[in-house]
Amino acid sequence: MIRIALIGFGTVGRGFAKALAENREIIEKKIGKFRISAICDSKSSITGDFTIEEALRYKLEKGRLPESIGVEEIIEQGAFDVIVETTPTDVFSGEPGLGYIKKVLLSGRDVITSNKGPLVVAYHELIKLAEKHNARIGFEATVGGAMPVIKMIRDGLAGNRVKRIRGILNGTTNYILSRMEKEKAPYPQILSEAQELGIAEADPSYDVDGIDAGAKLVILANSVFGKDVRFEDVSIRGITRITPEAFEIAVEKGYTIRLIAEADENGKLEVSPRLVKLTNPLAIYGTLNAVLIETDLAGEVFVIGRGAGEKETASALISDLVDFYGNGSFD
Amino acid sequence: MIRIALIGFGTVGRGFAKALAENREIIEKKIGKFRISAICDSKSSITGDFTIEEALRYKLEKGRLPESIGVEEIIEQGAFDVIVETTPTDVFSGEPGLGYIKKVLLSGRDVITSNKGPLVVAYHELIKLAEKHNARIGFEATVGGAMPVIKMIRDGLAGNRVKRIRGILNGTTNYILSRMEKEKAPYPQILSEAQELGIAEADPSYDVDGIDAGAKLVILANSVFGKDVRFEDVSIRGITRITPEAFEIAVEKGYTIRLIAEADENGKLEVSPRLVKLTNPLAIYGTLNAVLIETDLAGEVFVIGRGAGEKETASALISDLVDFYGNGSFD
């Protein structure tokens, strides 16, 4: 019986819990029996005997969970095999997730996270800490949402030298740029419509200034290319100054504009709006993400998928769970 | 030290050996030291102390290998941990690969194969045989070439219910259809040009009649959907009767024609030329392959990559090697 403690019970945490409940049969075929042994958000918790459905219902009805045990205490009690950490991202401090993750790895237990912050701030420290304490850290959910790009590179392309990764790693900006292209409308107008639809945040800077894409790029550079880079090392330009006129000229010449994140084996690390040929597979529309991986043996491998969403992130978190505890076969 | 015996030393086998030699450092980081302990083709062999480079040079210069030990004997001697089987495909009998693979699995040793035949004829028998004898069988190289589609579904999308897989699984037919679309030329003309370029075989029926795509679809249906289907269960129509006029009408309406292979959770199993919107990501050009995977959590994940080639197949074979003997981390 694998015991999962869930830290963070917002959209991502609840989406993960729901997916575990709904696809329990599929997942148990691969990892055997599991249960959520504790759930904890910033102000409440649930431990002991409870079902996933009960916890979800309680939170929905009361806006909180029944107990008040803090995250630190849950970690200290150690009644779990793996922590799934889904607290909010802070790419500059990594906190609060970073402190939690270190504590769990130090205790020799596994961590799976959807939180970019800790990996952007301390990738190599966390990998070393995990190794030292015979624990593991899974972070598929930090990059590319439902596209299993980390595992695809690490496992599916395992024998390859990866030369370059280029992609669209932020769905919000891709949505805005797609609409600017199609509707010839100015940035502020499309942004405010995206905000009304819930696709952009009230404070959109995290997305539109390229911070989110830059954070994901740091994680890719550190893991895939074995670099030791931080957020400050990324050259970042966002999309706020792109005009309808720029789109008009681009489209006339057979191009569009997309926010492209690029990292390569020589240390290039850049997020910027770029001209992309309309026939290029990277010219995708809406909130999709896409990644083009250039390798020596496999050539170019290209993936498109949903970059965000509660089910999509759950898919990535569960893939780490199966990576850790699965038997590596189809059933 | 992992000992690899290589059965089949044609284009695929030699490509695998070359890739092992060239990317030895990358691969040994993941699986530790390895060596090829025996190589065997239909009429010659090399065993004992030899380097990969020596074997490749000998074969190039003499058209054969120095010894004459048969495959059966190599398997009986058992001086290997894993067999990499790259003999020619026969999707109807599965032989000669099927017999070799069974023998190896029976001896409790692992098998990695690029040969569709054995898996099309006896997928579940081989999986059960492997389980029973505590051995493994890897077959990433049988579907999609350099696209790691098997591992992507099995591992990257592990928590998902897969609803449907649709794709272009044969590069030769996609090349012919791409050129028919662009050049408005008749099928026989493009076929003969493809044959001159080495993209189509002298006897092209394996590709153009949809047999190759159908074989890959059987492997996907058996593995991903857990079905028990055989080649006869696939409804197959090839591309030989598609006319320039059909393309003209399609393109006028915003479509193209592609050979689409489709399998779903309800048992659909079909290879046929279909209308594909020109804006659909499946409207790919040249010898590329593409697969669209529909799931419950991740939504649609789409991959494009090179479907064939010696390096590309080597990439897939090596990914199985790392799957079996790797540590599951980036280094």
Image: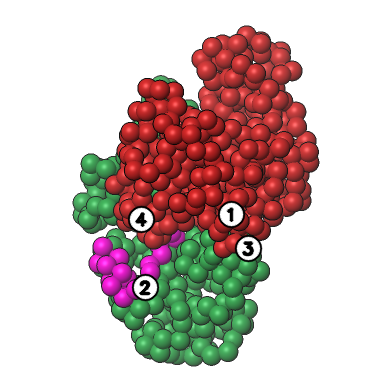
Chain colours: A red, B green
Relative to A92, B15 lies left or right: left
Measuring from the top left, give residue A2's x and y in whole percent: 39, 54
Residue contact between numbered discs 4 and 3, judged by CB atoms under 8 Å: no
Measuring from the top left, give residue B25's x and y in whole percent: 66, 69
Residue contact between numbered discs 2 and 3, judged by CB atoms under 8 Å: no
Relative to B258, A214 lies left or right: right
Q: Is residue A230 magenta?
A: no
Q: Nearer the viewer, residue B225 or B39?
A: B225
Q: Nearer the viewer, residue A273 or A89?
A: A89
Residue for badge 3? A132
Q: Chain of mark 1?
A: A
Q: Nearer the viewer, residue A219 or A275?
A: A219
Q: What residue type is disc 1 on?
A: Leu
Checking the image for residue A105, the label placed there is: 1
Q: What residue type is disc 3 on?
A: Lys
Relative to A247, B169 lies left or right: left
- What is the span of residues highlighted in magenta in the rendered image? B124-144
Measuring from the top left, give residue B97's x and y in whole percent: 34, 72
Residue for badge 2? B135
Q: What residue type is disc 4 on?
A: Met
Mark closer to the observer (2, 4):
4
Helix, strand or loop at label 4? It is loop
Distance CA(mark 2)–CA(mark 1): 33 Å
* 4 or 3: tag closer to the N-terminus: 4
Do the residues marked 1 and 4 share a common chain? yes
* 1 or 3: tag closer to the N-terminus: 1
Residue located at (66% from left, 58% from top): A128
Distance CA(mark 1)–CA(mark 4): 20 Å
Q: Vertical placement of B87 versus B187: above or below?
A: below
